[in-house]
Amino acid sequence: GENVEQHPSTLSVQEGDSAVIKCTYSDSASNYFPWYKQELGKRPQLIIDIRSNVGEKKDQRIAVTLNKTAKHFSLHITETQPEDSAVYFCAASTMAGGGADGLTFGKGTHLIIQP
Amino acid sequence: GAGVSQSPRYKVAKRGQDVALRCDPISGHVSLFWYQQALGQGPEFLTYFQNEAQLDKSGLPSDRFFAERPEGSVSTLKIQRTQQEDSAVYLCASSLVEGAVAFFGQGTRLTVV
């Protein structure tokens, strides 16, 4: 089955700086890679996703890059703000939403924005 | 409702007790997933429904776990004879169709004492 590794487990950056979170996956059949943001005690919320037919996608301060050859994808947040503080999860699947066997998640990155 | 709704939000069970966790997906959503999220970990897949059919239950940790969605809408995850290792947040997600983006509920935090 799919295995997703995520690094770092904790990331502390100064407000206004950029943050980068990296994930690797094992199953070359995976072709959908979402990122979820989870605040303490709240539901995971989709912030951006990318499919394997593109290498990069951007939405305002958030961008995701994908390297299919290396089985590696990353989340980039620029101009970080205090409200960006949360746990971020990457995930992989053979289908958007998870298909029949769901999404395989990384262990999460706790992003801390220092004022 | 506007989103996926789960109840109860919190459940404390004594070891050995049976529990039932409810998920109301977004209206009209065909696909429904259950995940288990241990403290400090990412969600782990438990089971998947397409309408009322349970197409995959490969993630259920033991035969004490049982899920149903009899009318293709509301789903219930039942855990029999709860153990301490069952303590976790149980998340439900739904998507409009297979292959569409999944939206999560707020989860039920189960604590087994």
Image (cartoon, grey):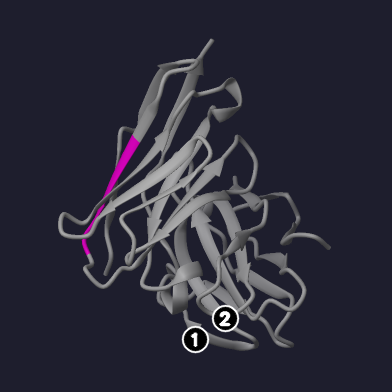
Magenta stretch in the rendered image? A21-26
Dominant SS type (magenta):
strand
Q: Residue at x 21, y 61 (%)?
A: A26
Q: Which residue is mark 2?
A: B49
Q: Is residue B41 visible?
A: no
Q: Is residue B15 visible?
A: yes
Q: Is residue B67 left or right of residue A16?
A: right
Q: Amino acid at mark 1?
A: Leu
Q: Are marks 1 and 2 in contact (CB under 8 Å)?
A: yes
> What is the spatial separation of the Cα atoms under label 1 and label 2, in whole angstroms?
6 Å
The answer to whether residue A71 is magenta is: no
Mark 1 surroundings within 10 Å by alpha-carbon count, few (fewer than 14), some (14 through 19), many (20 or more): few
Q: Is residue B71 left or right of residue A91?
A: right
Residue B55: mark: 1
Q: Position of residue B41 (x, y in %)?
A: 42, 44
Numbered disc 1: secondary structure: strand
In front of the other: A49 or A45: A49
Q: Amino acid at mark 2?
A: Phe
